[in-house]
Image (tube, grey):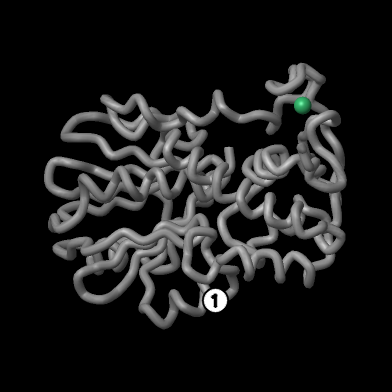
Amino acid sequence: MMPELPEIEHYRRQLGQWILDLPIQRVKLNHAHSTDVEPEEFAAALEARSLLFLERRGTFLIFHLDNGHRLLIALAKDGALYCGEQDEQPPFVSQAEIGFGERTLYIAGKGSVLRLMTVRGLDEVLKTLGPDPFSRQATPEYFVSQLKKRRGALRSILTGQKLVAGIGPRYADEIAFAAGLLPSVKTQELNGESAARLYEALEEVLKAAIDGGGCITVPLNADDAVTGGYLSQCRVFEREGQPCTEDGAPVQKMDVAGKKAYYCPQCQHEQTPVFS
Ligand SMILES: [Zn+2]
């Protein structure tokens, strides 16, 4: 599956307990195309450094190195992480490995990218993204005013990374379901109640998914029973033909701007239903 914000935030929180403030002892790139410099140069730049802080923006995981530089990790569609102790091996073919004391971080996914960057270089990349949904900029007022300015279907706007960063197909569908809105509705046409409900649904769904461990089913280490726990809580994404958890109506699939979207025809409407 495509890692989205909840999967990466779950990783960030978990890794924070294990890999901060420890010298990097081993770096191995199994695929030279994972980064933009020679593998030896990449390894030399990381070895003996340590991580002061782990940041996330949208779906980017950003390691703050103790020399002021950043290591940006962007996981590919089939990307995943594993952080094993000593001889624990990941259940995947790793693209890259970074060893911290007794732990090794393994990175999966053909096309996952690791980039050493300056703060300025990273800013150039991040400025193409909208605000993170949990940042101070992503207020309800910002969200509602931006919805009015954007042309397009709800699914396209949610996954576009400009309104807010980090939402992909899975959570766009889950958020639309939670808000009671069809993925095809034009955001410009949403009334005040619908726009406000959409903002709440976005925050609720992402928070629940982070707390639930996201939807990547690869465990983070041998003892991990949390990662992937939200998969069974998804209501519509890739559940075509299965009964809606609210009313039993079969979940359906529609095309929105050339992309698949899953929805319940009974729960989702042009505006959020108002219950009295
Ligand atoms: Zn339903």
Judge whether 94 appears above or below 66 on screen. Answer: above
Q: Quadrant of residue 252?
A: top right
x 41%, y 35%: residue: 93
Q: Nearer the viewer, residue 96 or 176?
A: 176
Question: Residue at image x 38%, y 73%?
Answer: 117
Residue 157 or residue 36, whichever sits in front: 157
Instruction: Name the residue tied to disc 1.
Output: 127
Q: Is residue 114 visible?
A: no
Q: Is residue 119 left or right of residue 47?
A: right
Task: Kindly indicate the quadrant of the structure image that contains residue 23.
Answer: bottom left
Residue located at (71% from left, 25% from top):
239
* Residue 25 image position (x, y, % from top left): 15, 54
| Picture coordinates of residue 206, whole percent (x, y) | 53, 45
Type of the residue with mark 1: Lys
Residue extending farthest to the front is: 276
Toward the viewer: 153 or 66? Answer: 153
Say whether residue 68 is left or right of residue 146. left
Q: Give above or below for 241 relative to 165.
A: above
Q: Quadrant of ligand 1?
A: top right
Q: How many marks?
A: 1
Vertical position of residue 167 compared to residue 209: above or below? below
Rendered location of residue 222, percent (x, y) = 27, 26
User: Which quadrant, please, contains the C terminus?
Assistant: top right
Q: Which of the 4 image quadrants contains residue 253? A: top right
User: In this rendering, would 245 be left or right of 252?
Assistant: left
Quarter of the image with the N terminus in it: top right
Q: Assess disc 1: are there few (<14), some (14-19) or many (≥20) residues with their C-alpha within 10 Å of its C-alpha.
A: few
